[in-house]
Image (spheres, grey):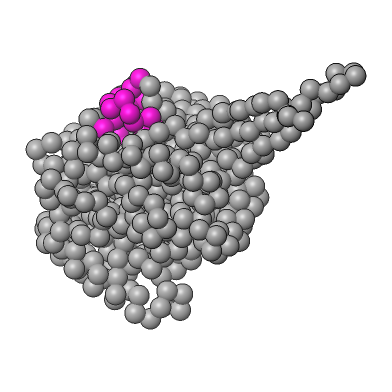
Amino acid sequence: MTNLKEKHQSALDSAVKALHERKFFTLYPENPSPEIYGETADKEGRDKYKTYLNNNFAELLQENPEQWVGQEESPYTQEKLGVKYPYFSPETLIDRAEKAFHQWRKVSPADRAAVLVESLERLKNRFFDIAYATMHTTGQAYMMSFQASGPHAADRALEAIAAGFEEQTRFPNQTEWEKPMGKYNLKLNKIWVAVPKGISLVIGCSTFPTWNTVPGMYASLVTGNPVIIKPHPKAVLPIAIVIAEVQKVLQENGFDPNICQLAVDAEDHLITKDLAENPKVKLIDYTGGTTFGNYVEGLPGKTVFTEKAGVNSIILDSMTDLDKVAQNLAFSVTLYSGQMCTAPQNFFVPETGVVVNGEKVPYETVAQKLAEAVTGLVNNPKAGPHVLGAIQNVATSDRVKDMAAMKGKSVLDSCQIQNPMFHEARTCSPVIYEVNAEDKEVYSKELFGPIVLLIKTKNTDESIKLAKEMAMEHGAISCGAYTTNPEMKEKIMDEMSLAGTPVSFNLTGGIYVNQNAGFSDFHVTGGNPAGNASFTNPEFVIKRFTWVGFREPVVG
C-alpha cells in the first residue's frame, strides 16, 4: 500500500488542486492516438471486444454465480451480443457487501484513494475495448464511445476520488484539546473518525453506462462504502470491464473483491427494486428517467443522489453570425442523435426574429438556417454517421415517428441515415417542429432523442420566462443562450440561476452546450427537478460518511 500511495500521490495532489482552480485538467488524454496509447491499442481493444461476444464474461472475481444471463444487442447490427454475466440474488449481493464493508471501512482514506487511482491506471489499458463495448451497447459513435467511456469517465472518477479524499482529510484525526480554567487547564485527547454510511447501490443508464456511473461508484468507494453496481440490462459490458479492473486491484492488495460488485437482472427477475428497498442499502446513486428517479428519492432511510430527465432550452436573442450559431446548434442536436441528458430541446425564438449585427432577421430565416445546418451535417457522409451514431432504444425511434401526430408545424422531417460500416444500424436524423408558446403541453416534458421544438415567443423576455419555468417545474441540465446585449445576458444569468440551471453563452466554435468538463463544470446542479445531486461538489461525497468524535481526559 505504501508503494501505491507514493506512486499516485502526485496525481491525487494535482486532482485536488484542479478541483480548487476549476481550470482545464486531465490525467487521461481524450485523443485515441497511437502516439499516446500505442500503435496496436485500437486493434487489440477491438479484438478483445470480439472475444466477449457469445461467451461468459469471466473476468469478475465474484464466485459461485447462480446462473449466467445477458440481454444486450448492438444498435449498429441489431444482433444480440450474446455476452453472459454472473447472476446473484439480491440477498447474496447484500450479504457479500456487508461482509466486505467491515474490512473496507477500516482502511485509511489515503490507502483507499491510492487503490482506486491504481484501478484507473489499469483502466487506461482497457479504454479501447471499453470503447467498442460502449459502441455496441449504447449506439454512440466510435470517438464519443472512446472519450466518454474511457478518458472522460476516468477523469470524472478521479474527480470523485479527489473530492472524497480531501473531505475526509480536511480535519485532523486527533488533537490534544486544552481549555484554560484559571489555576488549571482542562485537557482532553480528541479523535475523529469519518465513518462510512454502509452499502451503496449505483443504478446505471443505457446511454452512458460508465460516464454516469463511475462518479457515484468511486465517491462511495473512496469514502469507505462497498458498492453494488446495477447497470441497465442493455448496457452492461462497458461497466463490467471497469468493475473487473477494480476487483483485480482490490484482490492484489489484500482486499475482498466484493467491495465492488456487479449486479445484473435475470430475464425473469428484475432486481433493482429488491436492492434499493433493502434496509441494509444506505446510499443510492441513480441515473435515468424521472418516474423511477422519483421512486428512488422517496425511499425511506436512504441517502440518494439522482440525475433524472430535464427539458433543456436554447434562448435566441441576438448574435454576430447566425450561420455559425446555426452550425453549432445543429451539431448539438445531432450529436449522438440527441440521446444526451444535456442535449437541447426547446428553442425559444421571438416571433419578430433575432438581431444579427444590429439588423433584425425574421423568425422564418432563423428556422430555415437551423434546418439547413442540420440537413447539411447529417447528409455529409464524412460527418453525419459519425456524429449521429445509432439509436440505443427502439422506443426513441418510435418517439421521433410519433412527432408527426403532434400539435405543431413540421420544419424538418427525420430520415434514416445510412452508416457505411453498419448497414443495419438503427438511425434517424433530428426532426424540427414549430409550436407556439401557449402550447406548453407539447414542450413541458423531455422528448428524449433527436427532437427539436422551435417555440415562438412574443419577445426574449417571454423566452427567458418560459425557459426558467420549464427548468423549475420539469428540470433542466443545460441551457444555451445567444445575446450581444449585456443587460439581457445579465438577466438570463440571474433568472436561470434561480432555476438552478447553468447557461452557456454565445457558443459558435468547437465547444457545445452538451459538453461538461471534469474538474471544472458541475454536472447537474441539484437545484431543480432534473436531479438532486451534482458531481462533483463537496455534498456529493460528504453525505456518504459521518464524522464521529471520541474524547477522554489527558492522563498525567
Image quadrant where one finds the C terminus: top right
- Range of magenta residues: 275-300
Would residue 403 be found to the left or right of residue 35 on screen?
left
Foreground: 128 or 436? 128
Foreground: 482 or 153? 153
Q: Residue furthest left?
A: 268
- Residue 264 visible at all: yes
- Residue 360 visible at all: no
Q: Residue furthest right?
A: 183
Which residue sits at x=23%, y=66%?
49
Residue 420 in which image quadrant: bottom left
x, y (%) of residue 475? 42, 30
Foreground: 142 or 4? 4
Which residue sits at x=34%, y=79%?
40
Would residue 144 be found to the left or right of residue 406 on screen?
right
Can you say whether 276 is above or below 53 in the image?
Answer: above
Q: Is residue 260 magenta?
A: no
Q: Is residue 298 magenta?
A: yes
x, y (%) of residue 138? 26, 53
Q: Residue furthest front?
A: 556
Which residue sits at x=61%, y=57%?
14
Count how many numbered circles sit on residues in the image.
0
Foreground: 289 or 174? 174
x, y (%) of residue 102? 40, 39
Which residue sits at x=54%, y=35%?
194
Can you say whether 86 is above or below 417 in the image?
Answer: above
x, y (%) of residue 61? 27, 55
Residue 421 in which image quadrant: bottom left
